[in-house]
Image: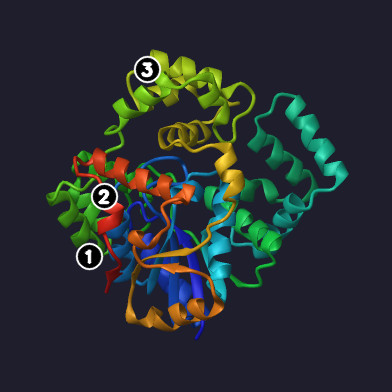
Amino acid sequence: MHTVGVIAEYNPFHRGHAFHLAQARERTGADCVAVVMSSCVTQRGEFALLSPAARTRMALACGADAVFALPAVWAARDAEHFALSGVALLKSMGVDAISFGVEQNNLPLLRACARLLEEPDAAFRTRLRELLGAGRPYPAALSAAVQERIPGAEAALSSPNATLAVCYLRAMLRLNAEMEVIPVPRQGSYHATGLSPDAPSATALRSAILRGNWAGARAAMPNAAYTILEQEALCGRIHRPESLDGALLCRLRSMSLADWAALPDLSEGIEDRLMAASAASCGREALLQWAKTRRYPYARLSRLCTHALLGMTSAQLDREPLPPAAWLLGMADAALPLLRRIKQSGFPIIGKAADFPPDEAWFRTELLAYDLWALGCGLPTGLALTQGVVRL
């Protein structure tokens, strides 16, 4: 059996995602397409619009054979660690190939960038420090330093999917993961605000849904995915971005200095700006817009807010660097050989939350993430314990 793996968020699932899954299967000749998907929290630190179970149903109905969770502890991280955790899961599950969407479909260039960033020499590190010392933000300094060594690299590193692609390739080097790599050219812009039916962006699709533009959403989604969206909306199971604003501000305003110091990825006095913003703002979006600067970008601040809300700490992430088990969210019959392969390898598969040991810190964080997602929809607690495995 040949299996191709995809790391995704599907927030929510659209026609571009269906195209990618079809291309991944066709170009690898895979018998099984396995997806590692962010659960309740996305890489940018936002809660997903739909529940993990609903997004799993969408993926299974539109080309995936198995969907596994990337829990909040690993999903709400910078691109490097998000990619590392996703690739580690695919490797542990014995997946034969990995496929990702990318703006720059130049695999040799992406591999060269990955090698330089994963194994930087002294001259590269020195040049990067010089650019940072000149006042450039870290992403811009990194991109410029790589461009000086690898012509054409700047365009790749300035594109969101290409940046993730380089991180996936870095993770493969770090983990000695020998998977076939299948880049699929992305159709349309990652952050486009206009909703294109043929090449939609998840950003534009979420905006359309939140505005009640159901005709636009229907045009941008496969029919099966839109039907699931419609059912979730009718049942009130859509998590609006502002629904946890009060909980977040309460948490940030009540944190002690020790709480702030314990947060992951804290540096350069970023906590001082967030503390000031939380005192001056009346909502999450206003807080992030107030606090962001070239030095403190929006996505980094967003993740820190979610880390604070979930009680995540740097010490916790040091103790739990990679996912220790495959949490199965959903499957079709075509995934049965993959599940047997994983079991034979000895890597744990969890089919329901009740099977998890409650003393695992990452699991407690995940239960809280589910409960906060449910709170934002006006639902009771315990969602993670009751959702079960979706079967197609």
- Residue at 26 percent across and 34 percent down: it is 243
Kindly tell me whether residue 309 is visible in this rendering. Answer: yes
Residue 264 at x, y = what percent? 56, 36
Q: Which residue is disc 1 drawn over?
A: 223
Question: Going 56% across and 73% down the picture, which residue do you hit?
Answer: 97
Residue lying farthest right? 123
In whole angstroms, how far apart are the C-alphas of marks 2 and 1? 30 Å
Report the front residue among 156 and 37: 37
Q: What residue type is labelled 1?
A: Asn
Q: Which of marks 1 and 3 is in front?
A: 3
Question: Total of numbered circles in the picture?
Answer: 3
Numbered circle sitting on residue 377: none
CB contact under 8 Å: marks 1 and 3? no
Identify the secondary structure beneath mark 1: helix
Q: Residue at x 36, y 48 (%)?
A: 367
Asked whether the residues under the numbered discs 2 and 1 touch, taking CB atoms below 8 Å apart as contact, a structural biologist would say: no
- The residue wearing badge 3 is 281
Q: Position of residue 37 (x, y in %)?
A: 42, 58
Residue type, mark 3 in image:
Ser
Q: How crowded is mark 1: few (under 14 residues within 10 Å), some or many (20 or more)?
A: some
Mark 2 residue type: Gly
Q: Is residue 213 or residue 295 the one in the foreground?
A: 295
N-term-proximal mark, 3 vs 2: 3
Numbered disc 2: secondary structure: loop
Which structural element holds mark 3? loop
The image quadrant of residue 198 is bottom left
230 with respect to 79 (left or right)? left
